[in-house]
Amino acid sequence: TYETIKFTTSDAIATLTLNRPQVMNALSSQMRREITDAVQTLPADMRCLVITGAGRGFCSGQDLTDRAAAADLEGTLRGEYEPMLRAIRACHAPVIAAVNGVAAGAGANLALAADVVIAAESASFIQAFARIGLVPDAGGTFIIPRAVGAARALGMMLFAEPVSARQAADWGLIWEALPDDAFAEGVAARARHLAQGPTAAYRAIREAVGASFGNDLDAQLALEARLQGEAGRTADFAEGVAAFLEKRPARFAGR
Ligand code: T3D
């Protein structure tokens, strides 16, 4: 039922493919709504979501031919970009961005909103906004300085040059850069790992790390204690300990 994305599921892994390859998967209004809907309605039995791009690019950011969005940038951000970013952050399953090619503007920041970013070595990240007289948005000014520090964040945003996947990995902006010929299998292996993991604990880990930059030590310790209390009551914790003691791999049910 989607027109601008492809959405498939297999073995508890959902794959959302941005699918406007003729424009490097530029984000149209419809595409933002479809991404948001797909993430918000992710079936409960999905235990990993992979977001990737069709064709040679990941996502070129805002569709620059869209006059309506350009006429009301603030409204577009509040009404369409923010729900998309929040949906990814709130997803019940961990989210992998599989950055197959260039990720520019809001397309880069869409990728960086994921829990784990894996890029092909030929991919790059461009905070393209200043090139066209705009400010990085879609969470970029929140996520990037926290990941790489202010000096690199400002350099990326003011010069608006491509940062290679390798550089991004070396800086800690992303999890890893993989050789192009190992990219698809590398992403699939990571997705399988997460989809077979303790999904509830993953969710708590994502919440704790997400909160850490806004909390002081006391608040963070309190959050850890609460989340650990919850994790300690999951079937996956019982299974994890049993598997350890029985010297066998754990079979996590995700709850
Ligand atoms: O509206 C709001 O609320 C504001 C929100 C803003 C958020 C933003 O994302 S602002 C930043 C917008 N994005 C950009 O400025 C990036 C623009 N694109 C590029 O710089 C380059 O296309 C790339 C670096 C991404 C890729 O370069 P390259 O040389 O590999 O490919 P290309 O030839 O430039 O692009 C291929 C086609 O895609 C081309 O069309 P054509 O000539 O084959 O008919 C190109 O025009 C089209 N395309 C690429 N990016 C966009 C796009 N069309 C519409 N919007 C795009 N963003």
Image: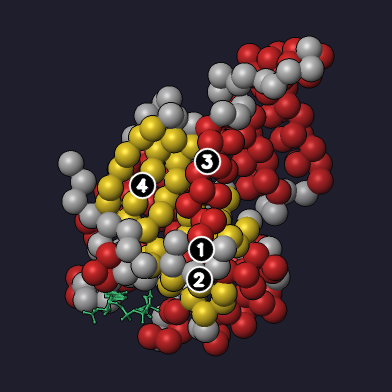
In the displayed structure, 2 sits above or below 199; it is below
Q: Are marks 3 and 1 in contact (CB under 8 Å)?
A: no
Question: Tag 2's secondary structure?
Answer: loop
Q: Sequence order check: which comes first, mark 4 or mark 3?
A: 4
What's the residue at 57%, 43% (across, down)?
190
Ligand 1 near label 4 (Cβ, under 8 Å)?
Answer: no
> How far apart in space, not on screen, are marks 3 and 1 (Cα)?
17 Å
Where's residue 215, x and y in %?
Answer: 72, 48
> How far apart in space, not on screen, are marks 4 and 3 (Cα)?
13 Å
The residue to which callout 4 is attached is: 16
- The residue mark sitting in front, 4 or 3, is 3
Q: Sequence order check: which comes first, mark 3 or mark 1?
A: 1
In the displayed structure, 62 sits above or below 222; it is below
For the question of whether residue 74 can be seen, the reply is no
> How far apart in space, not on screen, are marks 3 and 2 (Cα)?
21 Å
- Residue type pointed to by label 3: Ala
- Residue type pointed to by label 2: Ser
Q: Nearer the viewer, residue 229 or 48?
A: 48
